[in-house]
Amino acid sequence: MALSSSTMAPPHQSWHGLDAMQADAFRSLLQGVALICGLTHLAFCALFFWADVSALAYVSVASVLSYGFVFQLARRDRVAQAWTVTVLSVLAHAVLAVTVIGWDTGFHYYILLMIPAAVISSIRPLALKAGTVLGLMLTYLSLDIVLRHRAPANVLPDFVVEGLHYFNVIGIMVMLISFAGYYFYLLEKTAAALREMSQTDALTQLKNRRAITEAIRREESRMRRGDHPLSFVLCDLDHFRAVNESAGHEAGNAVLKAVSRTLESCMRDVDFVARWGGEEFMAVLPDTNQEGARLVAERIRRKVEGQLIEANGGAPIKITVTLGVATIEPGEDAEQAIVRADEALYQGKAGGRNQVVSAAA
């Protein structure tokens, strides 16, 4: 009964689950983009009205409305439509601005901002993403070739052009920092969720064997430093195969879930409980001697024995458990104590089941 986590595979993580997390992160990012861009275009509205470029002022009003629409689309999980509206809004505003008031105002930089956003987007298929990136690059290059040296349709005073240029440069920097920081936050959040998933049993929502192994190592180290007792309770469902065979696997799953909730209800905040494998569970009890662990195990046994489990609308299922208890002895490590708890458990199985057996020192 080795504690090596290399033998304890984490739960299967489907590509569908990972794609869903990426899509959720990108949806949240789009909402952030819509909020920041909407506020930026409000500033442009005031600026263009002040500079007497009413055409672009009204375009900025339309942009504010379009980003409000993007926010609502993303909120409703219509990510593809939100992304499409975002790209079209940025392109339309950038092309109109550099055509009307000139390349030197710096509105073309917003097209560059969309390229990394397209790369990290959750849009599928990959060919569509690649096409979007290529389209943005070609659009920018075409504008550079055609408009960079062309006189604008509406010539603004030099100080206004300079002000717009630096406003856009600083705005792009702020947006890049904001989007990168927000996306990093979303990635950290997703990574934390994946770590939690990798340490959680999908059926019972208890910690899995990998997670409890890490907890055991931490508690064993703490025990050695402070000379605190550390006990283990191994719990195995009696005649569980018969439940699966007679009532079906769905009923068996219902039994496992019900017993898991019972185990959790018997734990303190400092205790750990996990699905050890199949129909076997492990409880780790810090600062608990063998007698205390036996009392916990007996409480578990009585509570499981006393419950009726509803499953599939059939007759209620009654189940019992057998438990083995062991406390780390001087000169012993956690793995050896767990082996003794396992041996005690099987003594209880051989002795008639539905009982608690304490391991001999």
Image: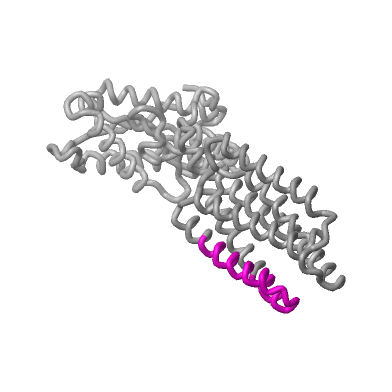
**Where on the picture, by quarter, is residue 291?**
top left
Question: Which quadrant: the C terminus?
Answer: top left
Q: Is 236 left, or right, of 271 in this rendering? A: left
Q: Is 31 left, or right, of 327 in this rendering? A: right
Q: Is 122 left, or right, of 361 in this rendering? A: right
Q: Nearer the viewer, residue 352 or 305?
A: 305
Residue found at x 57% / y 28%: 331
**Where on the picture, by quarter, is residue 345?**
top left
- Decide: is 270 above or below 96: above
**Where on the picture, by quarter, is residue 214?**
top right
| Residue 253 is a magenta residue | no
Q: Residue furthest right?
A: 158
- Magenta stretch prevailing secondary structure: helix
Q: Nearer the viewer, residue 289 or 140?
A: 140
Query: Range of the magenta residues?
Result: 42-69
Q: Position of residue 59 (x, y in %)?
A: 63, 67
Residue found at x 57% / y 35%: 126
Display colour scheme:
one colour
Residue found at x 59% / y 50%: 186
| Residue 43 is a magenta residue | yes
Asked if one can make out residue 298 in the rendered structure from this viewpoint, the answer is: no
Q: Nearer the viewer, residue 101 or 241?
A: 101
Q: Position of residue 287 (x, y in %)?
A: 49, 44
Asked if one can make out residue 29 in the rendered structure from this viewpoint, the answer is: yes
Q: Position of residue 220 (x, y in %)?
A: 56, 36
